[in-house]
Amino acid sequence: MQAALSTLLLIIYNCSDQVLTTRERRVTKSREAAARSARKTANAHQRWKAAKDAAKKGATGLQAQLSRKFSLKKDAENLDKFKILNQATPEIDVESLPHAHPITTSSMAASSSAVLVPKEKGKGPSGLMQIMHEIENDPEINDNFTVETESRDKKVTGNVTKGKQMNTRSQMFKYAYAQLEKEKAQQQENKNLTFSGVIKMATNTDKRKRPLIEISFKDLTLTLKAQNKHILRCVTGKIKPGRITAVMGPSGAGKTTFLSSLAGKAFGCSVTGSILINDRNESIHSFKKIIGFVPQDDIVHGNLTVEENLWFSAQCRLSADLSKPDRVLVVERVIEFLGLQSVRNSLVGTVENRGVSGGQRKRVNVGLEMVMEPSLLILDEPTSGLDSASSQLLLRALRREALEGVNICMVVHQPSYALFQMFDDLILLGKGGLTVYHGSAMKVEEYFSGLGINIPERINPPDYFIDILEGIIVPGGNSGLSYKELPVRWMLHNGYPIPHDMRQHAEQFDMSLSVNSANETDRNGPGHDEKTFAGELWQDVRNNAEVRREKIRLNFLTSKDVSNRKTPGLFKQYKYFLIRVGKQRLREARIQAIDYLILLLAGACLGSLTKSSDQTFGAAGYTYTVIGVSLLCKIAALRSFSLDKLLYWRESDSGMSSLAYFLSKDTIDHFNTVIKPVVYLSMFYFFTNPRSSFADNYIVLLCLVYCVTGIAYALSILFEPGAAQLWSVLLPVVLTLIATQQIDNKTMKAITNLCYSKWALQAFVVANADRYQGVWLITRCGSLLKSGYNLHDWNLCISILILMGVIARAIAFFCMVTFQKK
């Protein structure tokens, strides 16, 4: 039995990844067939359009030719008549005749209409031009165009309908790829737009309109509470929808802090100034369902494929009323724009198991936010670590988003000149978080030229500006400026108020600002009294407590949702999370198999080392079982949450359900909760051969695994991985030692009753003692009472273990949503 069980488990878990691979291969074949069908349909459409244009052009030429022919024939007839008349009346003036006038375009059109478009009994025009108009204006030809292709000796109809009632995967892929080919053709036509084309684009109602978000900020200043230091100061301006704004500056200029303040993630800072959204004083958290934030680190699921990462984000964050074919279209469009077609079925990879390249991983990181169709997209250094080609590919994808009206703001580090030209606006920050320039990226050179700072030839402008702000390069020419004076010049250029401690730099440029600043106290100057060590320590403790309280308040803050997007509810998100976690567990098959093998070995070792004793009802062996199973199951359960903290923080910050995330993890782990007792008992029960039944031992062990798994959840959420592992090893040993002590102290008894190991050990011993009969019937009650156990408390022990498991999970969930990092 043991060998058969272990062999079956190994086969299942080693082949589970192959099941996913086979399924992905089938999906790939369906998608490729749909893509081929869509391309063939698009090519046939292009050929039909070319043939239609050629026929139309030929008809126009034929019309002109026939018009000219009939006009010449009519002129000849009139000329013969004129000759006859001339013989009778030679005094008639030839120039007065109608045919003597030069043939104009209007006359040709009139004659052609008379010849080719005769009117019959009040009916409309007919003939060649009528046929051409019918071909051009017939919607059935354009919308229901069908191409028949051969696929494995079967005729596949590539008819792309606009109906959304598509249930099969093949139909959805055909719809998505047909739309993509249509968009490509539209982009090609847009290069040479006519007036009618512009009108068609303006009246196109097929595309979903995204709500626009404009963010304006005035005198935005962020100060660290602990150090009273400005990290962002007096920043004024706005970022507009449909434009890409680049935030540049030297290291320590507050670029990431600026983005964090716009996204409402600036903690530990006192914020002054105003931030308005669409000229209203709204909280940025009210728009979080339509705001995408791309962190600097590539926080993606390494054990999922590229497509699975994007598809999960689209399912949970797109509008709930969006049909599944349209969601497929959104994902396929992002994969197409980001150039991820070749790696869509490849695992993203982790540090241990390498997957896609670093540049592709970075694009997946950006794609997670693009698939939710945001109105505001904030990116923190998305081009870091990318080569020039990958950076331009990413910027082209963002440019397409901007054309949809998306407001894009991103931090970049010294981009190439080709990349720099793709930005619409530029925010240039100097040291101390002061604005040096904010405006059109194409006018930045003009502005600095006005200050006497000219860019040398063959020097990249962004590199030159950053070197100046770093203090590496002193501006040449007659400017006479230092990098410290550039923020003041920008304030004077726009008429912004200048802080008192910067007036000394401003006086040399504008004498009207000369004030008697000697009596003004500089808040950063030596006027402050130095604090003692105890005072600084107390201030740090207070600041840390305030930051923690602010984070907790934000976690439980319910802002009014004004995004007008209804995302999937709890149950739908639970379903999506369940599918994702199931795939992740299947891909971790070998790790699970190792866990089971270790449990088998532990059961065999503990079972063989334990000597069954009728005096103690096998208490020694069950004590080792409680310690061993608790330790192994806790360490294995730590992986459920320890490794996914960053991913959870990113997903919960975007509005995904924390409860659905937690329940899905716990639900999938129930498989291990059910199987692991069987694996362990298959060895332990065989070697010890206790009097209690296998079912009784299984029920107790099942409740024990359920309890310790919940405790492991709480440890993995509260502590870092190293500390959580240490606690997982320490707790089973300490709690079991406390539970086995015979103590009469009421306080210690109360502590003992809180130890799960006491109730698990009591349940094992009571189940074993219940099977004794005969002479042991007289002595077993006394032996149990000596150990502090009651023969009738088996159900109570089981209930307490289950209750402890539920309480541990509730504590874990509370800690997860309360102490999370934003």
Image (spheres, rainbow, N blue to C red):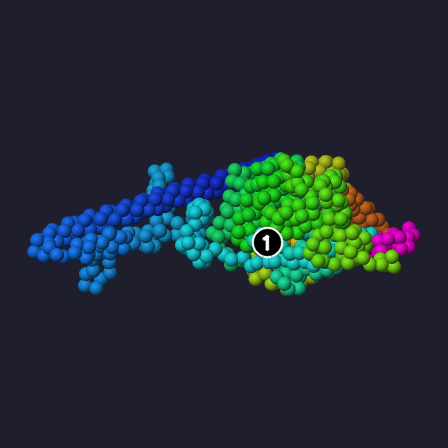
Instruction: Determine the residue positioned at 22% across, 54% down.
Output: 101
Q: Is residue 155 magenta?
A: no
- Can you say which quadrant of the picture contains the N terminus? top right
x, y (%) of residue 125?
24, 58
Q: Is residue 535 magenta?
A: yes
* Crowdedness near tag 1: few (<14), some (14–19) or many (≥20) residues, C-alpha within 10 Å: many
Instruction: Determine the residue positioned at 45% across, 48% down.
Output: 190
x, y (%) of residue 811?
73, 55
Instruction: Determine the residue positioned at 25% across, 49% down.
Output: 64
Residue matched to label 1: 407
The one of 460 and 570 positioned closer to us in this rendering = 460
Figure quadrant of residue 237: bottom right
Residue that extends furthest to the left in the rendered view of this protein? 88
The magenta span reads 522-545
Q: Is residue 422 visible?
A: yes
Count of numbered circles on the image: 1
Q: Mark 1 falls on what kind of element?
A: strand
Q: Is residue 90 above or below residue 601?
A: below
x, y (%) of residue 628?
74, 42
Q: Is residue 157 visible?
A: no
- Residue type at tag 1: Asn
The one of 410 and 174 positioned closer to us in this rendering = 410
